[in-house]
Image: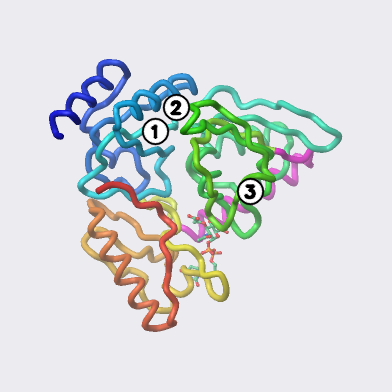
């Protein structure tokens, strides 16, 4: 079995540009994660397609992510191939103009912040909620990233998806996309998105972006390594951050994993935290919040690896 795995790995390494035994801590905002056996960063959809086709033929398990900003990778790392889509980008552009709506196109690996800047430069309104949200467009869509003032589902017109069975790229319109809170139920791999925005007022757009960014910077520990909000907000009642705060858990730590003093729903890596440290702290938070409020907090951050 091991011999077969080594053989299939070496075929992939010979045929594609692949990094071997790559530390994943360099690819996540948490700065945590053991090594991945194989890592590829395809630069266009054709490379992506060829790579996935070959990996599937060779029975190599594939894990996909973008800039790793909502991701916790285990200390033992990831077996098989990790495909990182953050190099999958071309030119953000306007593809359709109607009376007061404008549709823009971006590849999945494009930074959300760059798409926001494009909107500001072109006086387009609709992305203000996304000010300061890190990560790629693809990641933001699959997580249905958002805030109280908006989420990705409200501005997506369609996405292009690489179908895992046919290996064809197909366009899926927003009416067929099953978005929910911080989630898109999708099989297939997002390669690009068409986003519909409204022609707006330059001054107002800039003002709202600035306001949202300021709010984020003052209420969240943006200069610390983290994966953003760690838990989902409960459907009703107080937010996860407020519950953790009221339970008196700010500053609680397991080695270098700590509950942020600034925002209760952020677990920060204050030095050399391991995934194990983060998971132990997560359990303690869940236990304490449950004891105090009878509410079971659910993890928002995606966990990958063995
Ligand atoms: N609060 C506290 N103590 C804390 C943190 C918050 O009392 O330590 C209170 C705040 O005062 C406020 C309420 O809890 O009354 C909500 O806090 P906040 O406005 O910070 O919003 P949130 O619900 O904690 C959500 C998103 C964030 C997003 C902000 C900005 C989720 C899980 N979180 O946070 O998204 O940036 O709104 O509007 O939906 C993320 O998804 O990674 C993320 C950070």
Task: Please state which of residues 223 and 29 is positioned toward the viewer in this rendering.
Answer: 29
* 283 versus 190 height, above or below: below
**Badge 1: few (under 14), some or many (20 or more) residues near its Cα, within 10 Å?**
many
Q: Residue at x 65, y 57 (%)?
A: 149
Residue 293 at x, y percent in the picture: 44, 82
Q: Main secondary structure of the magenta part?
A: helix
Label 3 secondary element: helix
- Furthest toward the left, the residue is 3
Q: How is the image coloured?
A: rainbow
Q: Residue 112 falls in which quadrant of the image?
A: top right
> Which residue corresponds to mark 2?
87
Mark 3 vs mark 2, foreground winner is 3
Looking at the image, residue 276 lies above or below residue 50: below
Residue designated by label 1: 84
Residue 199 in the magenta stretch? The answer is yes
| Distance from the alpha carbon under mark 2 to that under mark 1 | 8 Å
Please state, as top left, top right, bottom left or bottom right, where the N terminus lies in the image.
top left
Discs 2/1, front: 1
3D distance between C-alphas at marks 3 and 2? 23 Å
Horizontal side of residue 196 vs 25, given as left or right: right
Front residue of this view, candidates 132 and 163: 163
């Amino acid at each position: 079995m091991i011999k077969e795995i080594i053989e299939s790995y070496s075929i992939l390494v010979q045929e594609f540009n692949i990094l071997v035994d790559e530390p994943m801590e360099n690819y996540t905002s948490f700065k945590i994660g053991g090594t991945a056996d194989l890592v590829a960063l395809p630069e266009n959809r054709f490379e992506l397609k060829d790579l996935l086709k070959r990996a599937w033929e060779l029975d190599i398990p594939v894990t996909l992510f973008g800039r790793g900003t909502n991701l916790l990778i285990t200390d033992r790392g990831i077996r098989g191939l990790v495909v990182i889509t953050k190099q999958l980008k071309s030119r953000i552009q306007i593809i359709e103009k109607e009376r007061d709506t404008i549709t823009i196109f971006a590849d999945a690996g494009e930074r959300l912040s760059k798409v926001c800047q494009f909107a500001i430069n072109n006086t387009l309104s609709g992305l203000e909620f996304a000010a300061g949200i890190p990560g790629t467009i693809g990641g933001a869509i699959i997580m249905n990233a958002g805030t109280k003032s908006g989420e990705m589902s409200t501005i997506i017109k369609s996405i292009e998806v690489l179908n895992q069975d046919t290996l064809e790229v197909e366009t899926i319109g927003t009416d067929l996309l099953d978005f929910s809170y911080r989630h898109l139920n999708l099989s297939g791999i997002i390669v690009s998105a068409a986003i519909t925005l409204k022609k707006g007022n330059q001054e107002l757009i800039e003002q709202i972006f600035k306001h949202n960014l300021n709010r984020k910077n003052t209420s969240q520990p943006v200069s610390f390594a983290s994966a953003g909000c760690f838990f989902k907000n409960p459907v009703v009642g107080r937010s996860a951050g407020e519950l953790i705060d009221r339970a008196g858990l700010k500053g609680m730590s397991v080695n270098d994993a700590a509950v942020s003093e600034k925002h209760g729903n952020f677990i920060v890596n204050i030095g050399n935290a391991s995934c194990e440290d983060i998971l132990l702290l997560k359990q303690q938070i869940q236990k304490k919040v449950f004891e105090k409020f009878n509410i079971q907090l659910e993890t928002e951050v995606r966990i990958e690896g063995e």
